[in-house]
Structures are given as C-alpha cells and as structure tokens.
Amino acid sequence: MRRVPGPGGPLAAFVDGGYLRELGAAAWGVTASEIAIDGPSLVLKVRQLADRHQVLRTYVYEGQFDPTHDRREFQDAEHRGLADTPGIRLRLGKVKEKRRGGLVQKGVDTLFVLDVLQMAQVGAYSTALLFAGDSDFVEVVDAVQRLGRRVEIIAPAEIPGLSVELRQAADRVHEVQNLSFGLMARPPGAPDETVRRRFKHGE
C-alpha cells in the first residue's frame, strides 16, 4: 500500500456548485436559484485552507439549463464570471426539469468523480479538497486514498450538510464558521437582519 503523503505537494479543489448553493440558500434564507457563487472569494478561501500546499486550481461543477430556458441568460452571465476568474476551471453538466416539478442535474456528479479520480491516477495532486457533502462521494474518496492521495473536506460549521459517511471517510474536515457568507454574493432582498438572526458571525 502506498504511503499517504503529509502536508505539502499540489492541492486541487473540487467544488460541487449545487451543494454550495444549497448551503448559501440555507444561510441567507432564500432559494438556491437566488444564490450566486463569488469566484474570487472561493479562490481566496481555497488558498487559505491550502496551508503549505501549492494550489493547482479550483474546479467548479455546475448544471446548465437548455438554451431555451428563461433562466439561461442569467445563468450564462454568472458562469462567465466564474470561468473568467483566474484559478477556476468551470465544468458544466445539464439541468433538467422534472415532469412533476423541480430540477435535477444530469452528468454533474459524473464529471466531478471522473476528474477527482483521473487526476489522482496521473499524480496531478497530492491532496484533494472537496466542497461536497453527499455520501455518494464516499467511494471515490476511498479510491483516491488507495492511490496514496489525501482527501480533505470543507464544511460549514453552522449548517448541517456533510454526511456522516463522507466525514468519516475524509482524512481531514475543515469546519469553517460563516462559510456561505464569504463565498456567496448577497442575494437581492436578503436583509442583514435575516443574517444576524440566523447566525452570530462568530461573536
């Protein structure tokens, strides 16, 4: 069995955009569709958590509406902002509407898992930093660890969202206070008092 490397070496961050939006929605008290990911703040947070690692880049995984969808133009503008942010690589799957209402992402998790695993196989990073919370990712974490790589998870301290199984599988969990506020653009109509009521900002 390969030895798991300690701190140091390249770090790649993999961000489940849908998961991050759900966290932001819970924090701000709005819907996920009202949340916008702040690319520069995301890059800065990754650098802060990287410690002695050299950051390779941050991969963000999002679902994209069909060109005819009424929200596609707004979404395209946000995605351009993310893609234009130095240090971010945007990876897009699809968003489909369910017959009985609601939305479902297609191909996003597949892109996420393939990138994490394939980059580990070629030695692109020594540590993967995941912004994800679903237990579906436990198997890829195990596969990456068996290749001799470390897997760390970032999670908000104030909002439940990280599955027990994924927490147990990770080599390290970074619990960050007020994570959503630093990575999201404040949505229109979300008053400051809503934020203060829900969280104390570490005070």
Image (cartoon, rainbow, N blue to C red):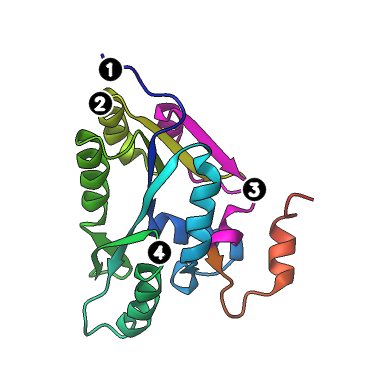
State the residue position of label 3. Answer: 177
How far apart are labels 2 and 3 at the CA level? 31 Å
For disc 4, the marked residue is 86
Counting other residues with Cα less than 10 Å from the Cα at mark 1, is it few (<14), some (14-19), or many (20 or more)?
few
Q: Residue placed at 48% from the left, 74% from the top? A: 34
Q: Is residue 78 above or below residue 39?
A: below
Residue 101 in picture, x, y percent from top left: 31, 71
**To which quarter of the image does residue 199 belong?**
bottom right
Label 1 sits on residue: 2
- Badge 4 amino acid: Pro
Dots 1, 4 in contact, CB < 8 A: no
Residue at left offset 27%, top offset 42%: 116
Q: Earlier in the sequence, mark 4 or mark 3?
A: 4
Frontmost of labels 2 and 4 is: 4
Q: Nearer the viewer, mark 2 or mark 3?
A: 2
* Magenta residues, start to end: 158-183
Whichever of labels 2 and 3 marks the residue nearer the N terminus, that label is 2
Residue 28's x, y, as percent? 60, 65
**From where the camera sits, is residue 132 visible?**
no
Quarter holding residue 163: top left
Q: CA distance from mark 4 to mark 3?
A: 25 Å
User: Gap between marks 1 and 3, in whole Å?
Assistant: 34 Å
Per the image, label 1 sits on a secondary structure element best described as loop
User: For mark 3, does the 10 Å Cα neighbourhood hold few (<14), some (14 to 19), or many (20 or more) residues?
Assistant: some
Amino acid beneath label 1: Arg
Viewer-proximal residue among 174 and 89: 89
